[in-house]
Image: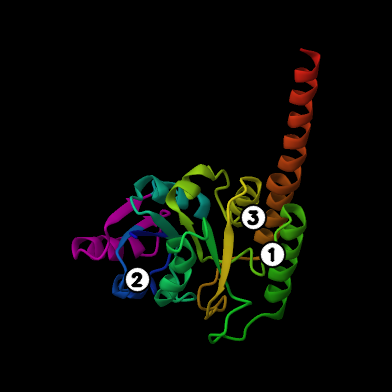
Amino acid sequence: MKLSVLIPIYNERETIEEVVRRVKEVPVDKEIICVDDCSSDGTRDILQRLADEGLIDELVLQPKNQGKGAAIRAGVDKATGEAAIIQDADLEYDPREYTRLMGPIEQGKADAVYGSRFAGEGPHRVLYFWHYVGNKLLTLVSNMMTNLNLTDMETCYKMFRREVLESLEIEENRFGLEPEMTAKLALGGWRIYEVGISYSGRTYAEGKKINWKDGVSAFRCILKYGLWRRIFRRRRRRSLAQAADKK
C-alpha cells in the first residue's frame, strides 16, 4: 500500500530537514508531500534544497499564510497513495510508527486510524498539565457530539484511506480541522480505529504554536460540525419523509 505523507509547514527551519529525513527512512512505499504555508524564516530555502536532492516528491509553496487546514487541502490535491497521513513538521511524532497505523487499514478493518498519545505504551515527554486537561476536555466534548469513544481527538497522527480523506471536504483553514475531520468521519459512518503512539512534545520556547485561542476555535468547530450538522441532517430527513408522505 502506497502512503502519501502530508507535511504542513510554517516557520520550521530548525526541524524540517530532520523530519523529512526521518520520514524518508521509514521502510514503506510512500510519497512525501510538503506544503509550506508561506514561511518567512528561511524554511522555504531548506525545502527547495531537499526537493532538489530528491528527498521531497511534491513541494507546494502557498502564496500566503492560510493555516494548517488550507495546507492539508493543498496536499490532498497532490496525493496519489492508497492512504494518507498527516505529519507535523516538528519532532513531536515518530514516523517509525507509520506501520502501526497502517495495520488496520491494510487488514481492511479501518477507514481511518488515529494515533493516540494517551493510549500508547511508548515514551511520552512530560510537559504542560493544562494542555493535557484541554486535550482531554476537547476529546470528551467531541465524543459527546459524535458518539465516538476516542481517547485523543486532537492528535496530529490521523491516517485515512485516500478516498475517505477526499470525501471529508475540509473547510477549516487552521487548527479547527481536527474536530471537523472527526465529526465528518462520524457523520459519514466511516470505521475509525485508534493505536497507541509515543509522543515527544515541545515547549513554546522550542517553537510550539498552538494556544488557548485554538482551543476556543476547536470548541466552535465541535459544535459547528458535530452538533449543528447532526441537527440539520435530522431536520432534512424529517422534511424529506414528510414530503414523501404527502405524495
Neighbour tally class for label 3: few under 14, some 14-19, many 20 plus, Cα within 10 Å? many
Reading the image, the residue beneath label 3 is 179
Q: Amino acid at mark 3?
A: Pro
Q: Position of residue 55 (x, y in %)?
A: 25, 66
Farthest left residue in view: 53
Give the magenta part as a residue range.
Answer: 34-61
The image's colouring method is rainbow
Q: Is residue 193 left or right of residue 32?
A: right
Q: Secondary structure at mark 2?
A: helix
Q: Earlier in the sequence, mark 2 or mark 3?
A: 2
The question of residue 52 being in magenta is answered with yes
Instruction: Report whether 236 appears left or right of 73.
Output: right
- The percent coordinates of residue 231 (x first, y second) are 77, 39
Left or right of residue 167: residue 12? left
**Which class describes the residues within 10 Å of circle 2: few (<14), some (14-19), or many (20+)?**
many
Name the residue carrying label 1: 212
Which kind of residue does numbered mark 1 sit on? Answer: Trp
Between 214 and 93, the residue placed more toward the observer is 93
Measure the alpha-carbon separation of dots 2 and 3: 26 Å
> Where is residue 36, by image quadrant?
bottom left
Q: Earlier in the sequence, mark 3 or mark 1?
A: 3
Screen quadrant of the N terminus: bottom left
CA gap between label 2 and label 1 equals: 30 Å
Residue bearing the label numbered 2: 23
Up-down relation of residue 201 to residue 114 (above or below) = below
Which amino acid is tagged 2? Val
Of labels 3 and 1, the one closer to you: 3
Determine whether label 3 and label 1 are within 8 Å by CB: no
Q: Earlier in the sequence, mark 2 or mark 1?
A: 2
